[in-house]
Each structure stands twice: as structure tokens, then as C-alpha cells.
Amino acid sequence: MAKVLVLYHSVYGHLEVMAKAVAEGAASVEGVSADIRRVPETVSEEVARASGFKLDQDAPIASVEELAEYDAIIIGAGTRYGTAASQMRAFLDQTGPLWARGALVGKVGGAFTASATQHGGQETTLTSLHTTLMHHGMIVVGLPYSFQGQMRIDEVVGGSPYGASTITGGDGSRMPSETDLEGARFQGRHIAQIALKLHG
């Protein structure tokens, strides 16, 4: 059995929804199990509540050490000025001991994201996460153009060859569309298939 971890941070619930779709895609592959974890929130509860953060998320909080237990890790983080949100960066910055012993070398990695606008830094956020995965010696997998939903021009959609994504709108009112969710499922399934081949 190959094990996939979907590790995410979500302020308003958009990436929580995307993470569930990624995990659904991964778990649809026979011989693969998928777990969802979220990284700790670094904003105080008082500030989070005042800012309308979605605090009632089902996923358990991840520990750094458990990352080594998985054959694939798919990371979801919101875009902040063209890079991943600081909560995810803070978590990943604690993975030095895993790096030091090569605990993630040869595992499969991928990323997904969300931004307020169509050109809000999604691709740079994804590639910055890829850089971290590559420093760990992981095999980076994106969202290939065989998922043709990312090529649609009849509606606003997320997605790029670097990973699945969604667009939230400036006020956060747009939740992931079915096309965005299809992209997330596709990426989860694609990564799980590769992890299973490498695991076997």
C-alpha cells in the first residue's frame, strides 16, 4: 500500500475544499491510502476569529516527523505576495532534521494553491514549493495538460502545469469550481499512481 499525505493550510476554507478533492483523487487509486493533515495556525485565536478565519476544519494538525511515513506529499498553501503563506513556510522550515537524514529523498511531491485573482502569484507560489520539495530530494509532479480543464477559456478556472489551483475573489466569495476540483482530483490521482509505481 502506498501512502499519500495531503498537507495544507487554509484560512477561509478554499484550500480545505481543494485538499479534500486532492485526497479523493489519490484514494481513488487502488493500492493507495490518502490522509489529510493541516499545519498549525500561527495567528492567535483572537486575531483569527476577528478576521473570520475558518477554525472548524476536520483535518488533524500535522507533525513534522510524520512526513517521513508517506510515499507522496502534496502541499496546499495560499498565495501571499507570490509565495506560500507564512504558516506553511513556518512548518516547512522545521523539516531540517528530515533533510539532514534524507528522509524524503525519492518520495513524490506536488503542490496546489489559491489566490484572490487570476494572476495573483499562483505559479510562483507553486514553483517556490517545488523548490523546497527538490531540496528534500523529492520527485516533483505537477498537473499535466492531459487535464484539459486548465485550458478552458469559457469560464474563470484555476490550474497550471505546476499544480491545481483556485481563484477566491478579493472578498473570498468564490469557492472552487467543479473544474478546479476536477483538477485537484486529477493531480491527486496522478501523483498517487506515480507513487504506487515507485513504491512497488
Image: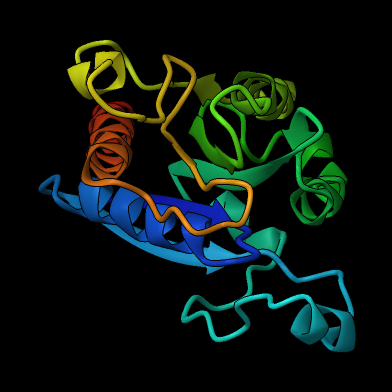
Q: Nearest the camera: 55 or 19? A: 55
Q: Residue at x 55, y 39 (%)?
A: 113
Vertical placement of residue 102 versus 138, above or below: below
Q: Residue at x 68, y 28 (%)?
A: 125
Q: Quadrant of residue 80?
A: top right
Vertical placement of residue 93 versus 165, above or below: below
Vertical placement of residue 135 versus 97, above or below: above
Does residue 38 appear to the left or right of 139 in the view shown? right
Does residue 46 appear to the left or right of 76 in the view shown? right
Q: Position of residue 56 (x, y in %)?
A: 55, 86
Q: Nearest the camera: 95 or 114? A: 114
Q: Residue at x 25, y 43 (%)?
A: 185
Quadrant in which the C terminus is drawn: top left
Q: Position of residue 182 (x, y in %)?
A: 22, 40
Q: Residue at x 60, y 27 (%)?
A: 122
Residue furthest to the left: 30
Q: Position of residue 59 (x, y in %)?
A: 49, 75
How many discs appear? 0
Does residue 97 appear to the left or right of 10 in the view shown? right
Vertical placement of residue 134 versus 19, above or below: above
Q: Nearest the camera: 138 or 182? A: 182
Q: Position of residue 151 (x, y in %)?
A: 27, 13
